[in-house]
Image (spheres, rainbow, N blue to C red):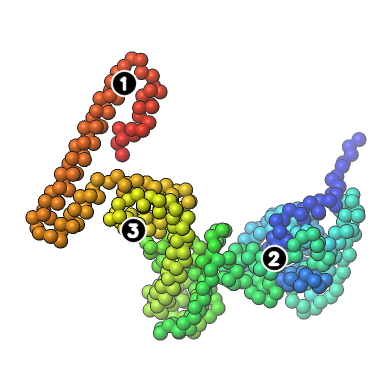
């Protein structure tokens, strides 16, 4: 006799699925991701004061769900949205985030009670999911009845609202700041998807770092409002640069306004610039389809120069702070070494070190310490120092002694080269003897080579 069996889904699964988030804010982000997938243009998150018993609300104006969509999609655990609907959303062609079909349980990580109210096609449906019911009904998730209400809602705009109440007090209550910080990386650049947390829309200020804002009236362009953050660099930014917004609409991709070609600004630092410049009124530098910028227009050139200068100044200030920090860390080592140099060499040495610190400021401490060490080594044993100093002194006196000093330089150079060459030849002779000796083992030859890699040339 052929019998069939089927899986029973234990309700513990919902708990396990809902407990895999790093923080309450990361769990909430799942609900915002769902609004994104539903082609919402706005999502409003309300985080009440923890002392009240008010629910956390995530409301969107997306497509909403019909009764059958709730049954076949929302309540269908682990079903893959992309196999159902393809990779892109139907209206805004967004890349769909839903993958696993379990994101809704994130709400149950922070709350015991979850109410989903959704409007689509003139109907409003409400489903209530109670964590306690799920836990009490240990054996089979499918047999737990979920209250489901359907109402006519003719003319109501579509969208979904999730209300989370009875928040778990063993977890940190979600805070607006932390939530905004998590959301800014994904949604800070989205023109068609505005996220409001307690009524305030995400902005460049939500990127952790130093924020600068300047408003100015440029002669050709008029009122411009530039705001940007130099991120703290702890997390890479998804699309760094400055977005140009004309009359509230973003044009093209984020840009660096020529700073990308500036030698003085380290590339790594540029990748931490995140901001917007808003221009109102003038729009003659935008292509007819509003998708790009006419780079050679005069007002765009004006904007470019302005943004370039502002950001460069801010980065230099910020950069020098970082350079000084780095320097402070190395100061002790540098100080001890500089003391060993004769007075007249110290100034050069210090200048050279400053240049090194500037250039390598974002390298690891160990790496910079090594570079500083090698530089100072070179300065301590450089025989040219003495001669160069002579030349400098005599350049101010008569031509005769100046010429002698220059000649001296050539002599030192020749003497050094000659000396080095004869020593190297001697070494090669010894090395040859070693190789010819039948008792020499390979490891002996290696040992001799170990500190004499010059044999192999540069
Ligand atoms: N706010 C919403 N608006 C419209 N439909 C929604 C909304 N939230 C969820 N859904 C529907 O319910 C389904 C299940 O959502 P859920 O978050 O559990 O899984 P997912 O988004 O498909 O995948 P993931 O587990 O990766 O988030 C979604 O695929 C979507 O069809
Ligand atoms: Mg999801």
What is the number of the mark on residue 351? 3
| Numbered disc 2: secondary structure | helix
Q: Is residue 344 visible?
A: yes
Residue lying at 84% horizontally and 75% vertically, measured from the top left: 152
Residue behind mark 2: 32
Q: Quadrant of residue 71?
A: bottom right
Q: Is residue 138 above or below residue 167?
A: above
| Among the two numbered marks 1 and 2 on one chain, the one whose residue lies closer to the N terminus | 2
In front: label 3 or label 2: 3
Q: Is residue 413 above or below residue 338?
A: above
Mark 1 and mark 3: span between their CA atoms? 46 Å
Q: Nearer the viewer, residue 178 or 155?
A: 178
Residue behind mark 1: 434
| Numbered disc 3: secondary structure | helix
Q: Nearer the viewer, residue 312 or 37?
A: 312
Q: Quadrant of residue 217?
A: bottom left
């Amino acid at each position: 006799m052929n019998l069939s069996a089927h899986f029973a889904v234990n309700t513990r699964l919902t708990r396990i699925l809902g407990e895999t988030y790093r923080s309450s804010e990361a769990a909430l982000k799942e609900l915002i991701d769902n609004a994104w997938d539903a082609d919402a243009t706005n999502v409003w998150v309300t985080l009440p004061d923890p002392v009240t018993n008010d629910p956390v609300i995530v409301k969107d104006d997306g497509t909403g769900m019909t009764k059958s969509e709730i049954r076949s999609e929302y309540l269908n655990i682990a079903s893959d949205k992309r196999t159902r609907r393809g990779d892109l959303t139907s209206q805004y062609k967004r890349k769909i985030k839903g993958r696993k079909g379990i994101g809704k349980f994130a709400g149950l990580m922070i709350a015991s009670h979850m109410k989903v109210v959704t409007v689509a096609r003139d109907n409003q449906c409400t489903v209530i999911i109670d964590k306690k019911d799920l836990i009490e009904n240990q054996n089979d998730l499918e047999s737990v009845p979920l209250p489901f209400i359907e109402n006519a809602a003719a003319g109501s705009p579509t969208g979904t609202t999730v209300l989370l109440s009875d928040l778990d007090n063993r977890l940190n209550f979600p805070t607006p700041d932390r939530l905004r910080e998590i959301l800014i990386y994904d949604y800070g650049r989205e023109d068609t998807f505005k996220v409001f947390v307690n009524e305030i829309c995400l902005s460049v200020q939500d990127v952790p770092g130093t924020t600068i804002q300047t408003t100015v009236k440029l002669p050709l362009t008029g009122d411009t409002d530039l705001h940007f953050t130099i991120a703290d660099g702890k997390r890479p930014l998804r699309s760094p640069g400055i977005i140009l917004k004309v009359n509230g609409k973003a044009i093209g991709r984020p840009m660096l306004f020529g700073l990308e070609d500036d030698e003085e600004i380290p590339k790594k630092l540029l990748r931490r610039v995140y901001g917007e410049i808003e221009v109102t009124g003038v729009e003659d530098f935008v292509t007819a389809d509003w998708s790009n910028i006419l780079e050679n227009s005069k007002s765009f050139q004006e904007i470019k120069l302005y943004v370039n200068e502002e950001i460069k100044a801010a980065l230099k200030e910020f950069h020098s702070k970082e350079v000084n920090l780095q320097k402070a860390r190395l100061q002790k080592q540098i100080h001890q070494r500089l003391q060993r140099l004769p007075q007249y060499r110290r100034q050069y040495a210090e200048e050279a070190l400053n240049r090194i610190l500037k250039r390598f400021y974002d390298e690891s401490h160990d790496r910079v310490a090594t570079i500083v060490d090698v530089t100072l080594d070179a300065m301590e044993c450089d025989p040219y120092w003495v001669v160069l100093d002579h030349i400098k002194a005599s350049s101010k006196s008569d031509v005769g002694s100046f010429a002698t000093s220059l000649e001296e330089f050539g002599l030192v150079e020749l003497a050094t080269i000659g000396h080095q060459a004869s020593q190297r030849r001697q070494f090669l002779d010894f090395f040859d003897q070693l190789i010819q000796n039948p008792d020499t083992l390979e490891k002996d030859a290696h040992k001799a080579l170990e500190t004499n890699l010059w044999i192999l040339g540069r």
